[in-house]
Image (cartoon, grey):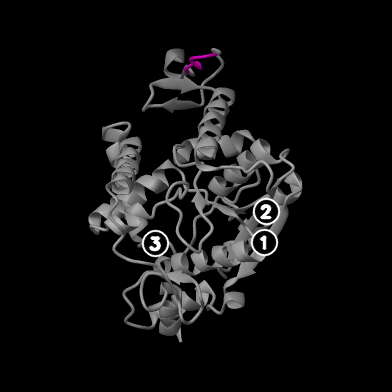
Amino acid sequence: MADLFEVPSCDKCRNPAIHHQVYSGRMMCGSHLAESVRKKVSKALREQLTIPRDENLTILVAISGGKDSAVLLERIYEKLNKRRNVTIVGGCVDEGIEGYRPPSLECARKLCESLGIRFETVSYPELGFKEMDEVVEKIVHSNDKKTPCSYCGVFRRQGINHLAERVGADVIALGHNLDDMAQTIMMNMQNGDLERTLRLAPHTSTPLEGMAPRIVPLRWVPEQEVHLYAIHKKLPIHHEECPHGEGALRFRHRDTIAKMEEDVPGTRHGLLRMADDVKKLHASSGVQRKTIPINCPECGQMCSGTLCKACEMKKLME
């Protein structure tokens, strides 16, 4: 009976393993999992971020108090904090979700304080938007078919842009992990939306005019490995999921991607490589994008229509 409970050993050091990396076949202890994550993030940073020698660079790290952004901030800090010409700022958008955002905001604040990093936050009312609890209440009592996430995603992007302008950020770092990227690519494929695929971060070689380029250093790290790394490093993270997330299209794609990955390990990596290849192919073709961004006449933010999505949704709420 004892064999049934035998803990497998790490492939490298023979210590007890905490993770089976199915797509590579490796068994990993906490230390070697952390090493794997560090290597992936460091490589992504080298590929996505160009640091000028004689100029200052300000990086806004979009944080939420969750595992992904906590690992993102910790890794960027460990990699770049000794560079004198690099300033790292943690920025959090307060969507106004009672019982969810206050404790996660506190986790984000604690992490910034522990690293000695400037912490900035902005709320939806400061941006002219209604808090998400009120948005959800309005959706429930109307015939609006949009999910709360549809509103929140658009408003939050405006919040990140606002924080980037406030701190004078040259680059915005987002905590999208491998699962997030694969889900987004699947959603774009389902909608036949090539334009969104071409706009996917990182924007290292495809900057969007008028916007600070986004980088996504965690994009090759699976969500489970990000979570295990955060626990291994004892980072202050909020574990709860947003109470308004139920029914979001992304959640359904999350289940689909997880099942595909279980059946064919490496599926997530394949989807991301395909999207990268599509972006490279388009860049080499010389074909211009269908939509040329303009400044929204209402708020001045970049948009692809006559009015940005945030202003459209703001008017719907009014």
In the rendered view, would you say 127 is above or below 68? Answer: below
Q: Nearer the viewer, mark 2 or mark 3?
A: 2
User: In whole angstroms, how far apart are the C-alphas of marks 2 and 3?
Assistant: 31 Å
**Residue at the spot of label 2:** 89
N-terminal of the pair, mark 1 or mark 2, is 2
| Whether residue 254 is visible | no
Find residue 237 and report its horizontal and vertical position in percent: 61, 48
Answer with the quarter of the image where residue 20 lies: top left
User: In whole angstroms, how far apart are the C-alphas of marks 1 and 2?
Assistant: 8 Å
Q: Nearer the viewer, residue 272 or 68?
A: 272
Tell me: 298 left or right of 291: right
Q: Which mark is residue 122?
A: none
Q: Which mark is residue 246?
A: 3
Find residue 131 and report its horizontal and vertical position in percent: 54, 75
Q: Which mark is residue 167?
A: 1
Q: Nearer the viewer, residue 255 or 221?
A: 221
In the image, residue 171 lies in the stretch drawn in magenta: no
Q: Please tell me which residue is depicted at 43% across the width and 84% down the height of the picture.
A: 315
| Mark 1 touches mark 2? (CB < 8 Å) | yes
* Label 1 secondary element: helix
Amino acid at circle 3: Glu
Per the rendered image, the range of residues in magenta is 8-12
Q: Nearer the viewer, mark 1 or mark 2?
A: 1
Amino acid at circle 1: Val
* Label 3 secondary element: loop
Amino acid at circle 2: Val
